[in-house]
Amino acid sequence: MKPVRSIQSKTVVLPTRDIDTDQIIAARFLTTTSKEGLGKNVFYDLRYNKDGSEKSDFILNKPDAKGCGILVAGNNFGCGSSREHAPWALLDYGFEAVISTEIADIFRSNSLKNGLLAISVDEQTHGWLLENPGVDVTIDLESTSISLAGDRTVEFGIDGFSRHCLLEGIDQLGFLSQQLDTIENFEETRSWKP
């Protein structure tokens, strides 16, 4: 995982409510334990026709969406079953952050553990982002704020552990590895030993 300090990108807007993890990455694509290559299947059933051709009206197939690293999603994004492949697919596609008014808890947890910043904002900010697709946005993880057009700044919440791991570019195992000296010292000095 690479460290995340700030993300600066144009947004792409997918305003649909209740996008579940099966819509993000369909179950038939979960046959791999590798993160690579999943991006081509993100939102597959929304992006492609049955013959595999692109649906011209789907937002990710439009030229303005290319290269956008921030997805502004409708309410209740990432609901449904728990699957780490969902944030993997979004990251492999090129997204670095998802912004919504509500992000499903398990999806948020899986995202943060894998380097995808999942942010909940208030309805007014969300409404503005939905109405202004393609706007330049800067997300600053150090100050936990989002900078919008017109010098408007909005703060967002994130738990301290996830923030630390994202800033350091480590996962939970990486965090434990950083504590190895403390763990070994504890094992050497504890009174009860197996």
Image (tube, rainbow, N blue to C red):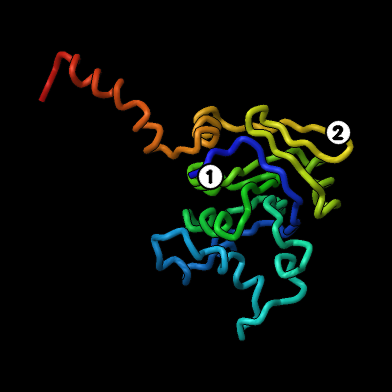
Q: Residues within 10 Å of mark 1 (few under 14, many from 20)?
A: many
From the viewer's side, name the closer residue of 28 and 6: 6
The secondary structure type at the circle numbered 2 is helix
User: Does the residue at mark 1 contact the one at mark 2 (Cβ under 8 Å)?
Assistant: no
Q: Residue at x 55, y 33 (%)?
A: 167
- Quadrant location of the C terminus in the rendered image: top left
Q: Is residue 146 above or below residue 31?
A: above
- The quarter of the picture where residue 102 lies is top right
Q: Is residue 53 found left or right of 135 in the rendered image?
A: left
Q: Residue at x 65, y 48 (%)?
A: 98
For badge 2, the amino acid type reads Asp
Tell me residue 149's x, y (percent): 86, 40
Q: Residues within 10 Å of mark 2 (few under 14, many from 20)?
A: few
Residue 190: image tag: none
Residue where numbered disc 2 is placed: 151
Of callouts 1 and 2, the N-terminal one:
1
Residue where numbered disc 1 is placed: 115
Mark 1 and mark 2: Cα distance apart in space: 27 Å
- The quarter of the picture where residue 67 lies is bottom right
Q: Is residue 166 found left or right of 183 in the rendered image?
A: right
For badge 1, the amino acid type reads Gly
Q: Residue at x 81, y 39 (%)?
A: 148
Tell me residue 108's x, y (percent): 56, 44
The secondary structure type at the circle numbered 1 is loop
Tell me residue 182's x, y (percent): 30, 20
**Residue lying furthest bottom:** 51
